[in-house]
Image: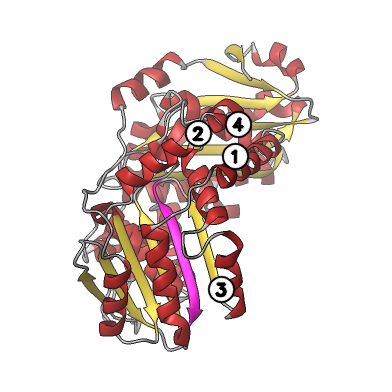
Amino acid sequence: MFRNITAAVFALCLIPAGMALASGMNFSLPEVKKAETGSGVKLFYIKDELPKTVIYVSVGYGRIYENSQNAGTGDILAGTLKHSGSKKYPGQKLYSVLENIGGEISISSGWENTYISIEVLSKYTDLAYDILKDLLQNPLLSEESLAFSKKSMKDKLKRNLDDPEYRAFLKVREIIYGGSGYGAVMTDRSIEDVKVENLKSVWKRYFVSGNMNIAVSSSEGFESVEKGISSATEKVPSGPRTYYTVDNKNIKENIERSRGKIYLIPMKLKQATIVKGTVAPDNRYEGRYALDVMNYILGGGSFTSRLMSEVRVKRGYAYSVFSLVRNRYKTGIFLSFAQTRNSNVGDVLKLFDDIFRDMYTAGVSDSEVKRAVDSIKNSYVFSFVKTSQIVSNFLELEYNGFDETYFNRYLKGISEVSGGNVAEECRKLLSGGTITVIAGDESLKAELSKLGDVVVVK
């Protein structure tokens, strides 16, 4: 979540219309109105000038809540609900009803949340409320739909496992997080083990009022929307907000055990995929501003980044090379990536380590910091395009517990980052070592053995 532009956009929707922002620019933004239904579900509303209504439901449950035994449950739940519908709107009837009026529905699972969205013309808003009400009250989590969803997930998994980039990123997360949460690895076995009873148990625990937020953008008035959503959620059971757990001690031990090791995923390829990563702080960490600037300078800033300049532009080792930082509610991750010819793998690995080390020993220049800060501050608005983005981002803010001062605090924090801050946060993040995973030909083992202890993994 909260990385550079994205972080700013999530908070942008909190600013009252016409307010002068910390970046020194003025924007006339839609007003966000809030309410809480009788059942305890939080509602956020934005007036839309177009004659339509879009309902976004966010439930605090996703892949990061899972472990190696139940990995895939969230995606399977979303797929099963999508296929089965509800008692009043079963299966194809749900889609036929919406298609006949030009409406749409989407049900999906993300890292931290499960999402349901329904979009209709304003004159069909009452129908949208009725569909939502029946989905929440009477979901048909049938055996037939579960079987269909599981087959779809197995087919998708098979395709993903042919992708070296997918496998390398997955293996880094698995090693760091010990196969749970951010590192939960979906397998045919974990998919097959999901039963209807498991889906119903997840629904009962997480689809409760305190763990559910709803945002609506509509040309309908606020009072009308509040009444409709209150009716749709009146029988949602009461229950608390439930977050996933993170074992930081175990994560630290996993990283320490892997120092000096190179994990090789054997794949018959002419080029190798390199991923180096480590755990990053959660999104409340005060140093996250400096981490965002650091990441921009290191590998997030396209052709201006150090990784791109040194690995691709100067040496031509890789076409694609980048880094990213993701700070989530209770944890985060840093990942860097490159694809290169097998013959260049050793050189690229050494170069990555040299670039990392140089960031926190020699530091960064004032011009690099200024360029990164200006880009982060000035480009956020380009992600603020649609009303739908505002309301969906607002749901993310609510999930993470940020208040209405977050946006100004973020831009202020970015503005105050210095070169010393960047070097210090880079040292904290990377000096403890990174997990190194290579997806490439098994013949690479001999060359990689000169750089570290090679561990061949599936």
Question: What amino acid type is highlighted by mark number 3?
Answer: Leu
Residue occupying image coordinates x 47% and y 59%: 86
Q: Earlier in the sequence, mark 3 or mark 2?
A: 3
Q: Earlier in the sequence, mark 1 or mark 2?
A: 1
SS label for mark 3: helix
Q: How many C-alpha atoms fall within 10 Å of the one at disc 3: few (<14), some, or many (≥20)?
A: some
Which residue is the site of mark 1?
Answer: 150
C-alpha separation, residue under disc 3 versus residue under disc 2: 30 Å
Question: What amino acid type is highlighted by mark number 4?
Answer: Ala
SS label for mark 2: loop
C-alpha separation, residue under disc 1 versus residue under disc 2: 8 Å
Which residue is the site of mark 3?
Answer: 98
Q: Residue 194 has which mark?
A: 2
Apparent side of residue 192 relative to residue 396 in the rendered image (left or right): right
Q: Earlier in the sequence, mark 1 or mark 4?
A: 1
Apparent side of residue 357 relative to residue 47 in the rendered image (left or right): right
C-alpha separation, residue under disc 1 versus residue under disc 4: 24 Å
Magenta stretch prevailing secondary structure: strand
Question: What amino acid type is highlighted by mark number 2?
Answer: Val
Q: Is-magenta flag for residue 396? A: no
Quarter residue 314 falls in: top right
Q: Is-magenta flag for residue 113? A: yes
Depth check, front residue: 174 or 259? 174
SS label for mark 1: helix
Quarter of the C terminus within the rendering = top right
Q: Which residues are magenta?
A: 112-121
Which residue is the site of mark 4?
Answer: 168
Residue occupying image coordinates x 80% and y 30%: 270
C-alpha separation, residue under disc 2 versus residue under disc 4: 25 Å
